[in-house]
Structures are given as structure tokens and as C-alpha cells.
Image (spheres, grey):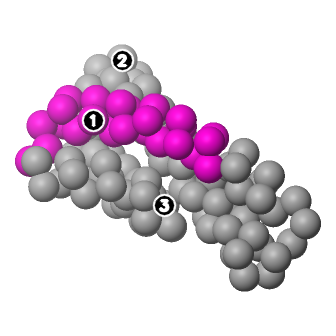
Amino acid sequence: MKKSVLTRYRVLAYVTGVLLVLLCLCMIGKYVLDLDGAADATRAVSIAHGWLYVVYLVFAFDLGSKAKWPVAKQLWVLLAGTIPTAAFFVERRISRELEAAGDGVDASTAAAKA
């Protein structure tokens, strides 16, 4: 598997995770603190998170299919973008697993290291 597959998953995992935490903060500002402008911020962040979550799903599914993960593991990774902060922990675990197994390194990188 190419390293770029893991890299693009990692980038989208962080972006999705940050946007989800930001969305939670915006919703607290809107519904709990009743801040001015929080409704507009919530709308903008929720739209951005929604669209980027779809891209995250595509990249995570691509990574899982190339790594030949079981369905349960694939579902956990796909759902990590919907639970605040879960994407950070799942991404770190998946990255460590794949790098330890050598799946995150393509042939040209492995040959350069040898």
C-alpha cells in the first residue's frame, strides 16, 4: 500500500476531528451561552464538517479496503469522525498499526531505507 493512502486518511481524520470539536463548541455557544453570531458559526462549521466527513469516509474506506480490515474495524474507523475527539485516537492507533506492520510504507520508500 502506498504511504499516500495513509497520509490522506490521517489528514482528513485530523481535519474532521478538529471540525467536530469546533462544532461542539459552536453549539454550546449557540444553545447554552446564547452568544451572538454562534448560529452562523454553527451553520458554517456543520456544513464544512458534513462535506469533509464524506471525503473522510471515502479515504477511510479506501485505506481499510487496501489494508484488508475486517468489517467491524472498518465500521469503527468510519464512525470515528462522528464522535468528538475519537478521530484523533483512532487515527493514531491505525497509523501505529500500519507503520509497525510495514503497510504504511511503499516499495520505493522501503528500498530507499535499505
Q: Residue furthest right?
A: 36
| Above or below 79: residue 2 | above
Can residue 52 be seen here? The reply is: yes
The part of the chain drawn in magenta is 46-70
Q: Nearer the viewer, residue 75 or 90?
A: 75
Picture coordinates of residue 45, whole percent (x, y): 68, 49
Tag 2 or tag 3, which sits nearer the N-term? 3
Tag 1 or tag 2, which sits nearer the N-term? 1
Badge 3: few (under 14), some or many (20 or more) residues near its Cα, within 10 Å?
some
Alpha-carbon span between mark 3 and mark 2: 28 Å
Alpha-carbon span between mark 2 and mark 1: 24 Å
Picture coordinates of residue 74, whole percent (x, y): 20, 48
Alpha-carbon span between mark 1 and mark 3: 17 Å
**Residue position marked by numbered label 1 in the rendering:** 61
Q: Say what secondary structure mark 1 lies in.
A: helix
| Label of residue 88 in the image | 3
Badge 2: few (under 14), some or many (20 or more) residues near its Cα, within 10 Å?
few
Q: Residue at x 43, y 65 (%)?
A: 83
Amino acid marked by disc 2? Ser
Amino acid marked by disc 1? Phe
Q: Quadrant of the C terminus?
A: top left
